[in-house]
């Protein structure tokens, strides 16, 4: 599902953010990405989501070769993945329901099937009763669950989450991780970057460790 | 403020700013149209009058006419007979001095004349030179009594017209530039306030045109609404001006020559406003940051 071959990323400076990264994550796997601040975790996720291209090497995600992808194809590639950010990125002037429905509306689904699917997913993340609330009026944990609902509603093959619990307290963090594991068990590849070593240890999942732009550990 | 209310407040202030800009432009257009019109009206009375002596022969008149017509800038040379001149004089005076118009002796006092008017393509600034040239050409011919072209008045008029034209063009340019600047700022503010929305739309796979469409539609709507309101505003201003000219300043006789923008002009103005709004939005919606900015170490 995700494949990096000899990937280098150099920012002007020069900053060597990624150095000869090799990795392969299969369908339905759950993988943690850890490493100190500045190690290159976010950079790696930018490559996966086609927000930036590698300086050299190959990046393949969900059947797309992102080194060769044309700008016009990027929106269609993005419909095959789900992205979760630390700061949720919900639209504040739309209800929970409307936020979650966006990916389906963008690809042109019919209103009726959108409605059914949104309620299904909200049920799954335990937010069906808050569907007509605005993001500013629900808790941080609920906002992140909304963001996850939006990231999985179109049943993407890959879900990447960059520090999804960075703004949440430990109890809510556990809730979010449980939810991500459930998403994975339904067949989606889940890739999560985090600083939280304790949680990574407890979860006993495959963990990649990044340091100074190079992969220095893989528990596989 | 609720998110929707905040959004509305921003939109409202953008509409107000854009309306003000468009109103300045449309009022400027109306003013310039009427100035130009008045200037041409005055211009029509700028002509050379050659007064003929009583005893001039028909061939003598023709000879002078031919000389005048040979100039490339002359549009027409009209022969005003003594009878016609008197008739005009009578109608003009009828209401003031009815007795005077009965007096046949007057006929002897009013001479026949040739009225020379210049082509409309001749720039106003050159009128004086051309008219004085023509005047000196015919002044000493036999049968010419007197030549008049309101020298002083014409020279003032020419200077006035060229000054007006320069000032109007400069002013129009400055106002247009300022309006475009203010409008694009307003639209950019609106786009910036919705940056989050663009980031999210790009993340979930909206195409470039999907992302742009709502902004362009909004910009077009903004332009249409603002320019339409601006036309209404300047029409109100125009009516007010006209009423003042008709009432307290009626002796100037300006109001009957005044006109607002034509229907075509109004429609064109609103269409231009709509396009300007849409184009402004199009330029403002570029790719924003990629959403990972918040998670950089
Ligand atoms: N757009 C950029 N231009 C220049 N340098 C950059 C850019 N983005 C990242 N970097 C640099 O690349 C390196 C890796 O950054 P990255 O954001 O990937 O780290 P990270 O592992 O996500 O850190 P954190 O845990 O703090 O989020 C850092 O040294 C950073 O300063
Ligand atoms: Mg990061």
Image (cartoon, rainbow, N blue to C red):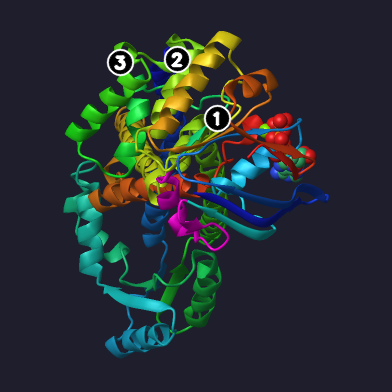
Residue A142: assigned label: 2
Q: Residue at x 36, y 55 (%)?
A: B41
Q: Dot 1 surroundings within 10 Å: few (below 14), some, or many (20 or more)?
A: many
* Residue under numbered circle 1: A85
Q: Residue at x 38, y 41 (%)?
A: B223
Whether pointer 3 and pointer 1 mark residues with C-beta atoms closer than 8 Å, the reply is no
Which stretch did the figure color magenta? A62-81
Residue B121: assigned label: none
Residue B224, visible in the rendered structure:
no
> Which structural element holds mark 2?
helix
Give the vertical position of B72 relative to B35 (above or below): below
Tell me whether marks 3 and 1 sit on the same chain.
yes
Residue B111 percent across, percent down from the top left: 32, 68
Give the vertical position of B93 relative to A209 (above or below): below
| Quarter of the render that holds ligand 1 | top right
* Residue under numbered circle 3: A128
Chain ID, mark 1: A
């Amino acid at each position: 599902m995700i494949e990096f071959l000899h990937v280098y990323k150099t920012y002007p400076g020069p900053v060597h953010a990624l150095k000869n990264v090799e990795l392969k994550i299969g369908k339905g796997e759950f993988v943690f990405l850890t490493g100190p601040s500045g190690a290159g975790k976010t950079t790696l996720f930018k490559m996966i989501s086609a927000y930036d291209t590698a300086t050299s090497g190959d990046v393949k995600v969900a059947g797309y070769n992102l080194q060769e992808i044309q700008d016009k194809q990027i929106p269609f590639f993005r419909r095959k993945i789900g992205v979760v950010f630390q700061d949720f990125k919900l639209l504040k002037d739309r209800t929970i329901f409307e936020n979650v429905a966006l990916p389906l509306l963008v690809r042109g689904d019919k209103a009726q099937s959108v409605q059914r699917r949104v309620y299904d997913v909200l049920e799954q993340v335990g937010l069906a009763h808050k569907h007509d609330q605005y993001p500013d009026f629900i808790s941080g944990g609920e906002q992140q669950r909304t963001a996850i609902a939006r990231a999985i509603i179109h049943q993407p093959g890959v879900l990447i989450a960059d520090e999804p619990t960075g703004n949440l307290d430990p109890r809510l963090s556990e809730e979010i991780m449980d939810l991500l594991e459930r998403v994975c068990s339904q067949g989606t590849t889940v890739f999560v970057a985090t600083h939280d070593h304790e949680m990574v240890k407890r979860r006993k999942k495959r963990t990649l460790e990044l340091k100074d732009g190079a992969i220095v550990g893989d528990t596989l | 403020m609720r998110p929707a209310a905040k959004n509305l407040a921003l939109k409202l202030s953008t509409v107000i700013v854009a309306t003000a800009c468009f109103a300045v432009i449309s009022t400027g257009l109306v003013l310039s149209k009427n100035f130009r019109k008045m200037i041409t009206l005055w211009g029509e009375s700028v002509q050379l009058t050659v007064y003929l002596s009583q005893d001039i022969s028909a061939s003598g008149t023709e000879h002078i006419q031919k000389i005048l017509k040979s100039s490339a800038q002359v549009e027409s040379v009209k022969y005003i007979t003594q009878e016609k001149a008197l008739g005009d004089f009578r109608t003009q005076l009828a209401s003031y001095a009815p007795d005077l118009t009965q007096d046949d002796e007057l006929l002897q006092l009013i001479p026949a004349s040739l009225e020379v008017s210049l082509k409309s393509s001749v720039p106003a600034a050159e009128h004086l030179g051309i008219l004085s040239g023509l005047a000196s050409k015919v002044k000493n011919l036999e049968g010419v009594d007197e030549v008049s072209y309101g020298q002083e008045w014409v020279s003032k008029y020419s200077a006035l017209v060229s000054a007006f034209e320069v000032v109007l063009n400069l002013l129009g340019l400055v106002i247009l530039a300022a309006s475009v600047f203010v409008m694009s700022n307003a639209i950019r503010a609106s786009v910036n306030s919705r940056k989050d929305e663009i980031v999210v739309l790009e993340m979930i796979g909206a195409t470039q045109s999907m992302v742009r469409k709502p902004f362009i539609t909004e910009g077009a709507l903004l332009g249409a609404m603002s320019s339409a309101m601006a036309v209404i505003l300047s029409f109100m201003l125009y009516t007010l001006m006209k009423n003042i000219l008709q009432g307290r300043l009626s002796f100037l006789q300006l109001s009957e020559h005044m006109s607002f923008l034509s229907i075509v002009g109004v429609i064109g103005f609103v269409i231009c406003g709509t396009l300007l709004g849409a184009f402004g939005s199009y330029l403002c919606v570029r790719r924003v940051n990629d959403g990972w900015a918040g998670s950089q170490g």
